Amino acid sequence: MRTAVIVFPGSNCDRDAQVALHAATGAPPAMIWHRETALPPLDLIVLPGGFSYGDYLRSGAMAARSPVLRALHEQVERGVLVLGICNGFQVLTETELLPGVLMRNAGLNFVCRDVDLVVENTESPFTRGCAKGQSLTLPVAHHDGNYYADDATLDRLEGEGRVAFRYAPHDNPNGSARDIAGILNERGTVLGMMPHPERAVDPLHCGTDGRAVFAGLMEALAA
Amino acid sequence: MTAVAAAADITAELVAEHGLSAEEYALILEIMGREPNITELGVFSAMWSEHCSYKSSKVWLKTLPTEGPQVICGPGENAGVVDIGDGKAAVFKIESHNHPSFIEPYQGAATGVGGILRDVFTMGARPVANLNALRFGSPDHPRTRHLVSGVVAGIGGYGNCIGVPTVGGETEFHPAYNGNILVNAMTVGIADAGRIFYSAAGGPGNPVVYVGSKTGRDGIHGATMASAEFAEDSEEKRPTVQVGDPFTEKLLLEACLELMATDAIVAIQDMGAAGLTSSGVEMASKGGVGVELELDRVPMREAGMTPYELMLSESQERMLMVLKPGREEEARAIFEKWELDFAVIGRVTDTGRLVLKFHGETVGDIEVAPLVANAPEYDRPYEPTPKAPVIDAAEIAAPNDQMAALRTMLGGAHLSSRRWIWEQYDHMVMADTVQRPGGDAAVVRVHGSNRGLAITTDATPRYCLADPVEGGKQAVAEAWRNLTAVGATPLAITNNLNFGNPEKPRIMGQIAGCVTGMGEACRALDFPVVSGNVSLYNETSGEAILPTPVVGGLGLIDDLRRTVGIAIRAEGLDLVLIGETAGWLGASLYLREVAGREDGAPPPVDLAAERRNGDFVRALIEAGRIAACHDLSDGGLLVAAAEMAMAGGVGAEIFAPPAGITLHGWLFGEDQARYLIACADGASVATDAARAGVPAAIVGRTGGNTLTAAGRHTISVGELRRCHEDWFPSYMARP
């Protein structure tokens, strides 16, 4: 299992992702600096949370134009799995590997709390460890998590089963369209999500509901 | 001595504008042996400001205990360091950013967080937790909401971006802070105990290196501003507030830690208050050496900056280092990787002088030793605060309805939930936050281990106003108790002494009293002071704040499986009250919030009882004998029981008081050294307590979905929660 975490200047959940991947795979992931232009052979790449490049301009906008992203696009074409968490999700929309945008939270404030999610898709390698309709409790911590896309795009995402996670009814922390918390690309190989599964893999910290995501990934990659 | 650039005439007005008295200026002339030029005057002004020199408080600070077997480094460095076992050390400090936060709340608070983070990572520690002790004016004051929202956004904006969790703190409102809010920021970091970095420069010829952001004109005279009272024109001081960039600080943090993993650094010091002046002088002074700086080599953000501006700028996210000879290129490569400025701006000398050059010309030349050692130190006259009369609990009227009184307190400005604040802080990044905000103390795991640090900030200013000595003791005791309540062994404190104008004997009496009380408590509890900060002149138009000596306490938990929180999660548990209850209502929250009075002597602090009771409770937690524990403080027994019920969603009953205590004294009295614990076998706890000489009584039982007192006063936990959660968001959303 060859995994990697991309580190941008300003990433701050890179260590959390590293710890979670190490625990899930039994091996430390490669930590890849943003200036790299070529990537080693990999099975899974994580774009971690944080404030890449200070989130100046727009969240994720500058990271989307960094050298390593070109290499990432090549890997996606080859079918390598990519998980973007929080700022990583913002990078994935900015680089157009996923549709839509993540706007400022509807309440305008940064929000950090546990949210209840509903698993919508159980076919993808990221979600096959979960049951359809399963409820997961994961923390969010973001200022720009208000997912928006036009109705046609939203209909298409829903129609193609590409909504991976929704916030439970009445537990939407940011005003995102149709309570969307995480979406997949067309092939189901790229997932962007605002909640932090990597923060919830340890009984002493936020519970263990995030393990389902990593366990599913390990299963998919072993298959 | 080389000729120094000619002085503009130093007039009496110029001296006064620099916050220096005529006597202080005479001392400068004596040290210099000539008239200083404007740059040199600026250096003296900054170094001798109250903020940098502690000239009014030092004589009292010296009385605090600072040693213990756990102490690796006490006050005097960038932060305090204590041993936490396993080869690790905790590095921590609290610092105020009161004046800037009042003028520009977002940037003031943000740069407060940035400054304290730098103090901690300068010593080689990775910051793992931030806390903030905040005090605002009356909720009804027209500026308060603006200040609350700006300060909270600023703290969050900085801490969230740099990726250090903000795990706790406290927030209080009182009209005495209408013109001077308090923003005290604390950071805790973890380092290898054998690899702590200090600021003493050494090795004549070694390069002095500047890293981080470029220098601009922001924050010039910040230290001087923080050392004077506000008048009505405080708005005009806005240009003296610095602007923070947490992204650059994150890069600086990672670059410094990367360089610290090598052995290239001789000394390192962050540029905080008084910028290049204080960092250069401190490094030279601590090392007993000289430093020569070529100011034209300082990376600059704007053209045309003068030596005076370069020496006094408080631009953020900068560090000064002394490297071993020949290691410059290795260090430069690391800082360039992180896209930060790196410049060799001078060298260590053996002259004992601070020499400033600008395009080859000497523009400043000061002997360092007298600049530091002869800094003014005042034993200012003080009037001890007269003792407030002890109020007999029996003369305080009972409320019409005990539960309505509880609702008033829990659903009001003082005790309502602070969720609105801490949900704006990333309190979980780094994935080691074991106890989140809302309990007695935050608990953060030592990464990769099963041990944890417990952290809290505490002060009860209304007690300090009524009786500074008891209030000073109580602040320390409450921090010690909060750490104990989560099962931690208290190790040491950092303190932030916030007071009014020390030139007034009445205020100086508050300072003297509070420090005396703190010292007594620290000694009795083996809880030394390892770092701290003093913020004086918190007055506007002659109105001083309440005396507010904030204690930041740190404790160690050996086995995180044994930590407990405040939440009652099971029915049928005994509630055991540890400690003696007399029903003390003087200076209590009940008296203020329900009876509308702010008078009386505060509850006395019996330090021997604190120690005995706390040690007993900690042993119970370590033995795994209790399910929940809460320290009793503001609002007393009923507030503690209500908070425990709300946190776990299980109700509780509190039995009637013992004979001789009024019901409201029993429910709301603030006698010290007390804890409320929930456990399966209260009787055996009471038996063991009796054997240990600790007062303990079963005073209630958990269960149901209501909180009931004395069998007849009842409120539902749901209603309590609603009023407790509602106040803050409603207040902030008020049209």
Image (tube, coloured by chain):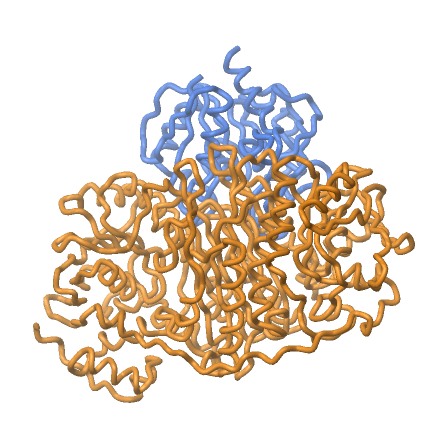
Displayed quadrant of residue B361: bottom left
Tell me what residue is drawn at x 75 percent, y 56 percent: B637
Residue B110 % position (x, y):
47, 58
Residue B413 falls left or right of residue B149: right
Q: Residue B148: image x %, image y %? A: 59, 63
Is residue B135 depicted above or below B690 in this figure? below
What's the residue at 37%, 40% (across, down)? B192
Residue B556 versus residue B511 in the image, above or below: above
Q: Residue at x 8, y 73 (%)?
A: B1
Q: Is residue B423 visible?
A: no
Residue at 31%, 71% in the rendered image: B47
Chain A: its colour in the image is blue
Q: Residue furthest top?
A: A223
Q: Colour of chain B?
A: orange
Viewer-nearest residue: B726 or B94: B94
Residue A194 visible in the shown view: yes
> Residue A167 sits in which quadrant?
top right
